Amino acid sequence: MRKVMKLALEERQIRIKCHYDLFDGYEIHLYGDERDHFALAENLDKPIITVHYPIERCDVYDVCNELNTDYFRQVIELCRKQHAGLVVHAETGLQRLQGNPNLEGFCAAIRDSGIILHVENCYRFVGAIESLDVAYYLRSLIGEDRVYPLLDTCHLIMSEMSFRFEEMSFFKTIEAYASENFKIHLNDCIGSGEWETGGIHGTNFYANQYLLRNILWMVHELEKKGISVDLILEVNEEDYVYPTNAHQLAGNVDRYWQKMEEEDNLALTERPSKKRRPPEKSED
């Protein structure tokens, strides 16, 4: 398990966040404008795990439409040079995506670049089940080892509460999304998760430690099966240079993870040893 921190390609963020030792890598948060200083990626002291396309236009349908832009080419080159995956959203659904005339060119660009595409579940127009359909459709066009579903835990909760989608349980969803290249946006929500209706999006589980412990238990069970998971701590911050919420979440992840490791070790030492039975006497 690796803990991944959100980071923008801005000089001040990089200068300060490079000193944080609670994290194992970065997910680059792109703005889509002059604030993205791509050359600064060379200054990072930890690996870039994923690069998130600018949030205002990160639905895969919209990314397809940027196929021939300089910005799209810069993002692909950043991912290629840093051996990082590209994160896009599955927001408008499979049927509309299939009708995009730029889809074939987009898939060819991903194939030619050699990068990995991560397709994130959403909640407004497409729930976690259909997001999975989008991911596997793209996988059929690009390659089985080149496209993986990415699970956002906050989006899953919000889609379950929206009454628009019939979602799987948390356990079943994590099981369905799990892969040999499994990324989780680890965050929570309060209420609806949307500020328009009084909700809070992307909290650090400060009101729901029980859910955090359960998610970590599921991740721990996957790791015991040999599936390594990257936990991307995608939580809201008042100040992204000094991300207090991400620090608190990272500390809680470490604390609960250590307890699970200790419990596993204790169970191994307390398990009674099986006595070997002597071979039965031959009738010969």
Image: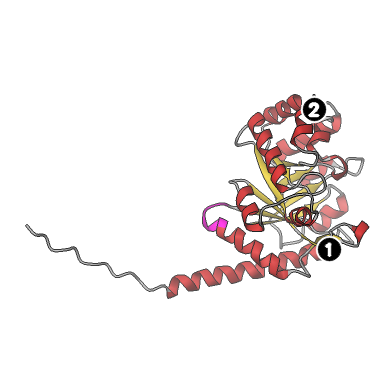
| Label 1 CA crowd tier, 10 Å (few <14, some 14–19, many 20+) | some
Label annotation for residue 191: 1
Q: Is residue 36 left or right of residue 157?
A: right
User: Judging from the image, what secondary structure is the residue with disc 1 in?
Assistant: loop
Q: Is residue 254 magenta?
A: no
Q: Which residue is nearer to you in this view: 75 or 124? A: 124
Residue type beneath disc 1: Gly
Q: Quadrant of the C terminus?
A: bottom left
> Please, what secondary structure does the residue beneath circle 2 have?
loop
Quick check: 240 left or right of 128? right
Q: Quick check: 231 above or below 179?
A: below
| Residue 52, position as x, y percentages in the image | 78, 44
Give the image quarter of residue 41: top right
- Image quarter for residue 100? top right
Give, as a single range, the part of the protein colored magenta.
Answer: 222-227
Q: Answer with mark 2 or mark 1, whichever residue precedes in sequence.
A: 2
Q: Is residue 248 above or below residue 64?
A: below
In depth, the one of 35 and 204 nearer the eye is 204
| Residue identified by numbered label 2 | 100
Q: Amino acid at mark 2?
A: Asn
Which image quadrant for residue 38? Answer: top right
Q: In the rendered image of this protein, does residue 3 appear above or below residue 276?
A: above
Residue 22 seen: yes
Q: Is residue 44 visible in this depiction of the protein?
A: no
Residue 99 in percent (x, y) is at 78, 27
* Image location of residue 146, percent across then percent down: 64, 36
At 71% from the left and 42% from the top, the residue drawn is 130
- The residue drawn where x is 58% and y is 46% is 180
